[in-house]
Image: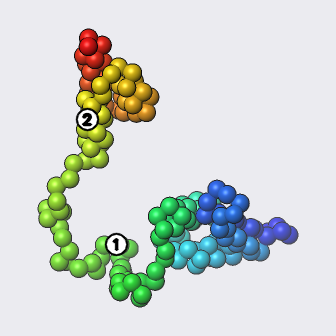
């Protein structure tokens, strides 16, 4: 045990003006218990984590909360005020106790995977360009990662470039 104890600071964002949570204790165990309680974690769920791993998880929670508040205008609403009933799990399964009448996967509307939507967006963007300069500026310069990710995008870009250069 150190004469100085243990101090952990968890920031909600990058800037100095962002929210901080500071945990001080005589021992690491004191700090650990405070972090678990502060972030509302289950003691059993994090029992095997080192303090370092616990701090990393708590930091992720803080950043997520900070981002939701800052970027999306999100606010924390207690379950009792939101009309939601907390789900109690006895076996560690977070899905246990949910209503069996909830929509099943087969009832969900069909959605394209995200990568297909991005690929199609790039293909449409390529097709909409009217000059080689526009093609280079609006497609290549602004969407470079898509070329490495989708071979069809690179092929369409080259074909459209040849087509436009003949005009």
Q: Nearer the viewer, residue 130 or 28?
A: 130
For label 2, the crowd category at 10 Å Cα-Cα, with few meaning under 14, some 14 to 19 and many 20 or more, is few
- Residue 112: horizontal and vertical position, in percent? 21, 48
Dot 2 lies on which element?
Answer: helix
Residue 46 visible: yes
Establish if 25 lies above or below 112: below
Identity of the residue furthest to the top in this view:
166
Judging by the rendered image, the residue that carries numbered circle 1 is: 93
Residue at figure coordinates x 17%, y 77% from the top left: 101
Residue at figure coordinates x 23%, y 79% from the top left: 99
The label shown at residue 42 is: none
Q: Nearer the viewer, residue 107 or 17?
A: 17
Q: Quadrant of residue 25?
A: bottom right
Which dot, 1 or 2, sits closer to the camera? 2
- Residue 52: horizontal and vertical position, in percent? 63, 60
Q: Quadrant of residue 55?
A: bottom right
Q: Nearer the viewer, residue 59 or 120?
A: 120
Identity of the residue furthest to the left in this view:
106
- Residue 43: horizontal and vertical position, in percent? 52, 76
Residue at figure coordinates x 26%, y 11% from the top left: 166
Report, in whole angstroms, how far the alpha carbon at label 1 lies from the one at label 2. 43 Å
Left or right, residue 56 beside residue 45: right
The quadrant of the rendering that contains the C terminus is top left
| Rendering colour mode | rainbow
Q: Nearer the viewer, residue 126 or 110?
A: 126
Judging by the rendered image, the residue that carries numbered circle 2 is: 124
- Residue 134: horizontal and vertical position, in percent? 37, 26
Left or right, residue 71 beside residue 163: right
Dot 1 lies on which element?
Answer: loop
Residue 155 visible: no
Left or right, residue 18 beside residue 110: right
């Amino acid at each position: 045990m150190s004469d100085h104890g243990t101090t952990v600071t968890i920031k909600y964002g990058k800037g100095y003006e962002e929210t901080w949570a500071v945990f001080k204790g005589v021992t690491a165990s004191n700090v650990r218990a405070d972090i678990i309680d502060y972030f509302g974690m289950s003691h059993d769920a994090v029992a095997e984590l080192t303090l370092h791993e616990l701090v990393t998880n708590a930091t992720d929670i803080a950043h997520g909360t900070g981002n939701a508040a800052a970027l999306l205008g999100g606010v924390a609403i207690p379950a009792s005020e939101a009309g939601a009933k907390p789900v109690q799990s006895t076996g560690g399964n977070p899905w246990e106790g949910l209503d069996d009448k909830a929509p099943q996967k087969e009832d969900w509307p069909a959605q394209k995977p995200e990568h297909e939507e991005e690929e199609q967006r790039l293909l449409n963007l390529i097709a909409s360009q009217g000059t080689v300069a526009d093609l280079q500026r609006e497609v290549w310069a602004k969407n470079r990662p898509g070329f490495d990710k989708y071979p069809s995008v690179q092929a369409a870009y080259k074909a459209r470039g040849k087509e436009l250069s003949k005009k």
